[in-house]
Image: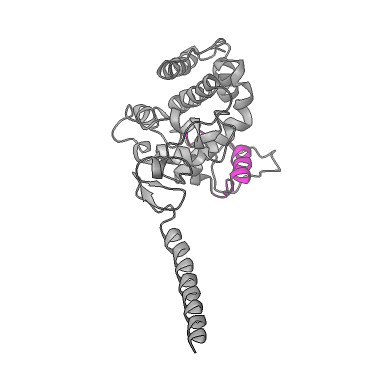
Amino acid sequence: MALLKMKKDVLLTFVLLGIVALAIPTHVMSQNCNCAPNLCCSQYGFCGTGEEYCGQGCKGGPCTPSPTPSGGGSGGSVANIVTPAFFDGIKNQAGANCAGKSFYTRDAFLNAANSFSKFGSGSADDSKREIAAFFAHVTHETGYLCFLEESDKSNAYCDQRDTKYPCVAGKSYYGRGPLQITGNHNYGAAGQAIHFDGLNSPETVAKDPVVSFKTALWYWMTNVHSVVNQGFGETIQKINGAVECNGKQRDKVNARIGYYTNYCQKFSISPGENLSC
């Protein structure tokens, strides 16, 4: 009888341990990245502040992981370079009534940057120059992160010759987002790449801040990233060279250069050569 009782006790112990084990993941999942904006979601799914929550493995919020040797996207050096002070320092120069004041956030940018691991990659200085260049153009295009879309909406920017990404009746593809993505081809290609309906719902770029930053980073990585090492002037060519470069709109070129050199100074790096176009 004693042996039988012992077997029953052991069996009961294993049953209780199984119940506890099943309960733990449920608790963790219930805490998984549903944190307040000022809290980090740790690698184990709990909300809090400090290295334990915001350090290695942090899943969301103001994460502060150590830099990776390659630059490695927003999970590493990008998050450390684009500090709250840097990001808000740009946005705070916009007017109080700007739509972008509440729309564009550092968290949305870092969330979007997580999808582009090559952004800000390379050496420490190369990473900083690329980030400085990106935000120089963003600052110019949005007026210090003020505008969600361009003011002149009279042009639908529909290229009827583009059969791969045909225009949708009643939709306009004017500039929206941090880099003012424009044209049905760009909306269609960006939508396909980052998984939103760019042709049928181009307005999403001005309504969802993460999608907005993703379209800007998609454009940057597709068209600009490869020339960053050739100098800031080449990035101007890729962004709006046909309209501004070769003496066409020198004031706008100089404005972009001014933002870039200012941000390089903030990052304590030289801006490099070939600044103009």
Front in this rendered view, residue 241 or 116:
116
The quarter in which the C terminus is drawn is: top right
Give the vertical position of 66 relative to 60 (above or below): above
Task: Specify the farthest residue to the left.
Answer: 96
Q: Quadrant of residue 248?
A: top right
Where is residue 238 shown, x and y percent of the image? Answer: 60, 23
Where is residue 213 shown, x and y percent of the image? Answer: 49, 38
Q: Is residue 182 magenta?
A: yes
Front in this rendered view, residue 64 or 126:
64
Q: Is residue 268 magenta?
A: no
Task: Specify start and end residues of the magenta stretch as a single range.
Answer: 176-201
Q: Quadrant of residue 239?
A: top right
Where is residue 116 shown, x and y percent of the image? Answer: 57, 37
Q: Quadrant of residue 145?
A: top left
Residue 117 shows in the view = yes
In the picture, measured across the screen, residue 153 lies left or right of residue 274, that is left
Q: Residue at x 71, y 43 (%)?
A: 163
Front in this rendered view, residue 253 or 5:
5
Task: Specify the farthest residue to the bottom.
Answer: 1
